[in-house]
Amino acid sequence: MVDFIADYYNKIETYPVLGQVQPGYLRTRLPDTAPYCPEPFETILNDVKNDIIPGMTHWLSPNFFAFFPANVSSAAFLGEMLCTAFNSVGFNWLASPAATELEMVVMDWLANILKLPKSFMFSGTGGGVMQNTTSESILVTLIAARDRTVDVVGVENMRKLVVYGSDQTHSTYTKAAKLAGIHPRSIRAIPTTADTGFALSPVLLRRVIEADVAAGLVPLYLCATVGTTSTTAVDALERLTDLAKDYGVWVHVDAAYGGSACICPEFRHHLDGVERVDSLSLSPHKWLLSYFLDCCCLWVKNPGLLVKALSTNPEYLRNKPSDSDLVVDYKDWQGFIKSDPRFEIVVPRRFSLVCFRLNPFSWSGLGYTELLNRKLLEWVNSTGRAYMTRTIVGGVYMLRFAVGATLTEERHVIAAWKLINEGADTLLKGSFYAV
Ligand SMILES: *Cc1c(COP(=O)(O)O)cnc(C)c1O
């Protein structure tokens, strides 16, 4: 298996990045029932080679520029092997003391690296815990916030609770709010515009909260984002927390992707104001070289509220001082798009995601430009030589090019840019007839 995996990594560039199969392809290739007799290992690996790999989208390919990268490292691979070998179940301290204590130590390490205040660390007054996903981090903190507020306003006022975010907050937020019992009409998605770089406007938020309070509703929770999924917009934590404090609103920071960059001194300012928020989550499986397994780090100022609301085992609250440091390297490329007048960068690049579009004709309407970009994306992805995705923000259809797969080198970015140009050339040649 190790050889097979090593082979896969060696050959990864030879596979189309985006799986080139039709829905239902696998059912026609596999038997209707599980094999009755055991099969040789070689046969099974051959099935993987012939039937599974062609249907995969290769997230580790250096030509993967879609969504956000899911980058990994040899260190993470070995760690996963060891975890699998141990199969340790650490639901409470006694079930596996080392698992709990290591998690505490490492959460403090990471908090230290991010220069989070002591109020988020076990060596201070808070603590961190690994959740599976951002969705879970939002859900558990929302439930803690809900119970804290319900203790004050009474359960009969559950229906009055209102939660806030922007129209750029990750879609998982709405789901978490519904799961926490917030009425769908009480989930505010405040509109953003290009003027604020698609960040949440504190002025608008104040207006919405004031209107809610005037209507007898109870502001509960604000989800601010550092690095939104569409365009990596950053909500201004300092001003938002000022406002939230006035209304006793729990502030959670979703830094799933952008948070990792804040390890670098030059990006740390995006977390300015974090000392006043209640919780923060960051997913190392997005940009910190960890595997996509159970790896969303959540820090809370008042772990007691979480434990009270969720009745999980309180062992992880034990104070465990820790002082250590770690270095992580990053890569970041930009430049090509600005050099070609047919293209434009739609929102300023902040981290390693570039949002751009092909916009060659000043006279063309939004509809035409969107169609052109849709076709370009389809063209690029269908080659199998690169994979990127798209978004629509502020009514503008744009392409998302997220650099950060572990194996990606500068040459892959250059090749992808050439490919995008080739697509643009092909489409624009065609469009002379269409126009
Ligand atoms: C990816 C992402 C999420 C969703 O993360 P899950 O771990 O899949 O729940 C949430 N918020 C932001 C900003 C993201 O980039």
Image (tube, rainbow, N blue to C red):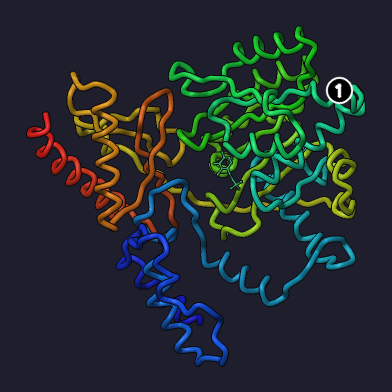
Q: How far across and how far down the image is residue 308, in percent?
A: 90, 42
Front residue (pair 282, 169) = 169
Q: Residue 319, can we see it? A: no
Q: How far across and how far down the image is residue 29, in percent?
A: 41, 75
Q: How far across and how far down the image is residue 12, in percent?
A: 36, 67
Q: Residue 156, can we see it? A: yes
User: Going 67% across and 23% down the picture, which residue do you hit?
Assistant: 185
User: Going 46% across and 22% down the picture, which residue do you hit?
Assistant: 197
220 on left or right of 377: right
User: Going 65% across and 9% down the picture, which residue do you hit?
Assistant: 207
Ligand 1 within 8 Å of the CB at mark 1 = no
Q: Quadrant of residue 295?
A: bottom right
Q: Amino acid at mark 1?
A: Asn
Residue ID for mark 1: 157
The quadrant of the image that shows the C terminus is top left
Up-down relation of residue 215 to residue 82 (above or below): above
